[in-house]
Amino acid sequence: EVQLVESGGGLVQAGGSLRLSCAASGFTFDDYRIGWFRQAPGKEREEVSCSSSTDSSTYYADSVKGRFTISSDAAENTVYLQMNSLKPEDTAVYYCAVSPWPILVTGGTHYCPRPSQYNYWGQGTQVTVSS
């Protein structure tokens, strides 16, 4: 059975850090692109990052660039999202997802797979940043 399980969310003060984990079972990340999404109450889902282990392509939304970092542990089949310098506006439920579609690179700009192209999703983990 294919499964993604997120963990690591919680309550943190502004300026603090959290590391989210996304553990996979039933498949390996090597065959997929990984995306991290978030959704705050009343707001649309936002893709904050996507990454490909095959060619190291990585994209970060402007809202998190320089503060968030994707990494992975192949032995643990786990992907991480390190979140530093957290802001209250980072408060949301965070989801990891995987897609068989590639990250497109055009003119130096990375384009993540569309949300509809991610075929496995985790259950989400709540991140709350207090001011």
Image (cartoon, rainbow, N blue to C red):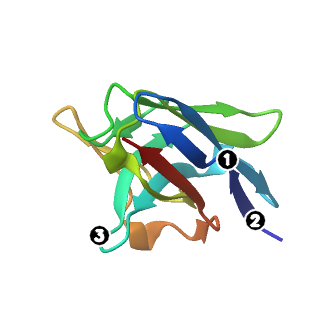
**Are there few (<14), some (14-19), or many (20+) residues within 10 Å of tag 1?**
many
**Are there few (<14), some (14-19), or many (20+) residues within 10 Å of tag 3?**
few
First in sequence, mark 2 or 3: give its number: 2
For residue 3, the mark is: 2
**Amino acid at dot 3:** Lys
Query: For the residue labelled by badge 1, is the local secondary structure a helix, a strand or a loop?
Result: helix
Q: Name the residue under label 1.
A: 29
Disc 3 to disc 1, C-alpha distance: 29 Å
Disc 2 to disc 3, C-alpha distance: 26 Å
For residue 43, the mark is: 3
Count of numbered badges drawn on the protein:
3
Residue at the image point whose x is 38% and y is 47% from the top: 90
Does residue 35 show up? no
Closest to the observer, 40 or 66:
40
Pointers 3 and 1 in contact (CB under 8 A)?
no
**Amino acid at dot 1:** Phe
Q: In this view, does 64 lie to the left or right of 73?
A: left
Closest to the observer, 80 or 85:
85
